[in-house]
């Protein structure tokens, strides 16, 4: 049942193995309402797997995910109405313009057509997809960054309480990234909560008030940015926890020949 006092998102013991290899190992995370949490970790650490289980896209082997107290797997409709999701490799209907896609998406969610129309126009304008719309560009013709932005627009359209965004800044140009940061800050200031994954430590330090580091499928550090970072930089803590790798003097000698 929806709870006013519960965390915006609470993951407990989420575990998933693919062909016997554990991708997420008892992942736990608490996202307080009105906070912005960054999930960081090396390639293959289990970020996408954990986020997909958290939002009801991938069934966990065990563990629970609660959105404002509502179990994502037991009450999916209630939980998903509160969630805005940008999954990894979002599969969108592509032979539509951005506005057509948002209309389709909104109506599918049972939203009022006039509300969908006005929010879609506003999102396309703010995300600088308006000019492509005027030229009738189809989503299939969008660049990688434009696809990311239209994916974000679909996540925001129904005004969710909690945003779960898998690498939202990947391939997004610096001007659009600034707009996106401002949008997320405003969303949080209005009481919303965000979890996002990113490989860019400086972005997480600038934007997020909480952070979780995941390595080999396990959460190895989490808390406020100050708690996790201490007197170091997030990158230093990350490298210390995840392990440093270097290119030896004898590696890749063929590259310069
Ligand atoms: N559908 C799948 N089938 C088999 N193995 C998978 C599948 N999805 C993920 N994995 C494996 O699970 C592990 C975690 O992958 P995941 O995509 O969650 O990592 P990630 O932290 O998001 O990585 P990246 O930063 O590279 O996006 C990896 O070893 C990956 O190969």
Image: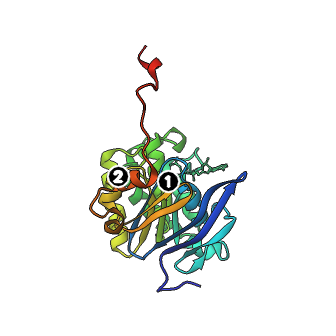
Circle 2 packing at 10 Å, graded few (<14), some (14-19), many (20+), is: some
- Residue 184 image point, x, y percent: 37, 63
Which circle marks residue 235 in the picture? 2
Would you name the residue on which mark 1 appears?
151
Tell which of 51 and 83 is nearer to you.
51
Residue 193: name its quadrant: bottom left
| Left or right, residue 198 beside residue 11 | left
Farthest residue toward the left? 231
Q: At 54% from the left edge and 41% from the top edge, which residue is drawn?
A: 140
**Mark earlier in primary sequence (2, 1):** 1
- Residue 13 image point, x, y percent: 60, 70
Q: At 36% from the left edge and 56% from the top edge, which residue is drawn?
A: 237
Residue 67: name its quadrant: bottom right
Circle 1 packing at 10 Å, graded few (<14), some (14-19), many (20+), is: many
- Residue 153 image point, x, y percent: 46, 57
Residue 199 can be seen in this image: yes
């Amino acid at each position: 049942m929806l709870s006013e006092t519960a965390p915006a998102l609470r993951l407990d013991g989420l575990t998933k193995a693919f062909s016997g290899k554990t991708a997420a190992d008892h992942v736990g995370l608490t996202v307080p309402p009105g906070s912005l949490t960054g999930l960081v970790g090396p390639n293959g650490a289990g970020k996408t797997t954990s986020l997909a289980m958290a939002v009801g896209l991938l069934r966990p082997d065990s563990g629970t995910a609660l959105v404002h107290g509502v179990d994502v797997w037991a009450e999916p409709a209630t939980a998903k109405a509160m969630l805005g999701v940008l999954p990894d490799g979002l599969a969108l209907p592509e032979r539509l313009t951005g506005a057509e896609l948002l209309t389709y998406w909104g109506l599918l969610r049972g939203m009022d057509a006039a509300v969908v129309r006005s929010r879609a126009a506003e999102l396309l304008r703010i995300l600088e997809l308006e000019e492509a719309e005027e030229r009738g560009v189809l989503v299939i013709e969008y660049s990688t960054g434009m696809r990311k932005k239209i994916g974000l627009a679909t996540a925001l359209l129904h005004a969710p309480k909690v945003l779960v965004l898998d690498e939202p800044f990947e391939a997004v140009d610096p001007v659009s990234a600034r707009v996106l940061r401002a949008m997320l800050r405003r969303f949080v200031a209005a009481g919303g909560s965000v979890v996002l994954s990113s490989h860019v430590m400086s972005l997480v330090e600038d934007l997020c008030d909480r952070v979780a580091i995941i390595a080999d499928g396990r959460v190895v550090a989490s808390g406020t940015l100050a708690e996790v970072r201490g007197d170091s930089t997030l990158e230093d803590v990350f490298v210390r926890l995840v392990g440093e790798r270097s290119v030896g003097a004898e590696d890749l000698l063929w590259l310069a020949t």
